Amino acid sequence: MRIAVCPGSFDPVTKGHLDIVTRASKLFDRVIVLVVINAAKTPSFSPEERVQMIREVIGGSLPNVEVDTFSGLLADYVRDVGAVAIVKGLRAVSDFEYEFQMALANKKLNPTSDTVFLTTASQNMYLSSSLVKQIAQFGGDISDFLPSQIVDRVASRLCKKE
Ligand code: COA
């Protein structure tokens, strides 16, 4: 059983994340999408809401994918579940330095797992959760960026237009 963990803030999950998770599910026997508390960020959705949104989006379409939440060191979680890989999407060269640093640190903390980078699909290269939230705050159309199941919820939570 080869287990992979796809970690992130997922605040909220985007089509870019979904693409990476879907592709990871074809490469590994079991994939855990892990909503991690990133202390450097102020989220718009609670961890429980983020988990719920990911579960709704995945539905029954990816039977080997499950969703969990965690606060702490990613390397500890990965070791505890016996995962062989951390899967991350690389959007652009600008992601590389930070991701490289994280991958090396995670390898040092838990030598039994590796970080696997999947190149983000070209249509998602510029996408981030913050970008989608900014567009939603001003009433912009976010339907191209988010899975259809959560578009209305994210828009109604964030839109500040009267
Ligand atoms: N498509 C679209 N957007 C993507 C994407 C993709 N394929 N991959 C990443 N993104 C976006 C994310 O939505 C995120 O957007 P945001 O900054 O607007 O929220 C942005 O790119 C950065 O993503 P990422 O670098 O994965 O950050 P993150 O906050 O989602 O996740 C953690 C970072 C939680 C995995 C990391 O901080 C962590 O592991 N924390 C736990 C503590 C720990 O172990 N630290 C490491 C010590 S070595």
Image (cartoon, rainbow, N blue to C red):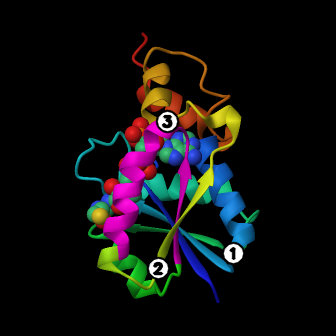
> Is residue 36 shown to the viewer in this render?
no
The residue at which mark 2 appears reads as 113
Q: Earlier in the sequence, mark 1 or mark 2?
A: 1
Label 1 or label 2, whichever lies nearer to me, is 2
Residue 36 at x, y percent in the picture = 37, 60
Q: Residues within 10 Å of mark 3 (few under 14, many from 20)?
A: some
Question: Mark number for residue 128?
Answer: 3
Closer mark to the observer between disc 2 and disc 3: 2
Q: Which residue corresponds to the image point at 43% horizontal and 12% vertical from the top-left?
A: 161
Which SS class for mark 3? loop
Q: Is residue 94 left or right of residue 150?
A: left
Residue 145, picture quadrant? top right
> Which quarter of the image is occupied by the C terminus?
top left
SS category of the residue bearing label 2: loop
Lateral position of residue 29 relative to residue 90, left or right: right
Q: Nearer the viewer, residue 57 or 109?
A: 109
Q: Position of residue 96 (x, y in %)?
A: 45, 46
As drawn, 72 above or below 152: below
Q: Is mark 2 within 8 Å of ligand 1?
A: no
> Counting residues from the N terminus, which is met first, the one under dot 2 or under dot 3?
2
Residue at 59% x, 32% y: name it: 152
Of the numbered discs 3 and 1, the one sitting upstream in the chain is: 1
Cα–Cα gap, marks 2 and 3: 26 Å
Main SS class of the magenta portion in the image: helix
The answer to whether the beta carbon of the residue marked 3 is less than 8 Å from any atom of ligand 1 is: yes
In which quarter of the view is residue 45 placed?
A: top left
Q: Which mark is residue 106?
A: none
Q: To which quarter of the image does residue 125 belong?
A: top right
Mark 1 Cβ and ligand 1 under 8 Å apart: no
Disc sitting over residue 64 in the figure: 1
* Residue stretch rendered in magenta on the structure: 85-107
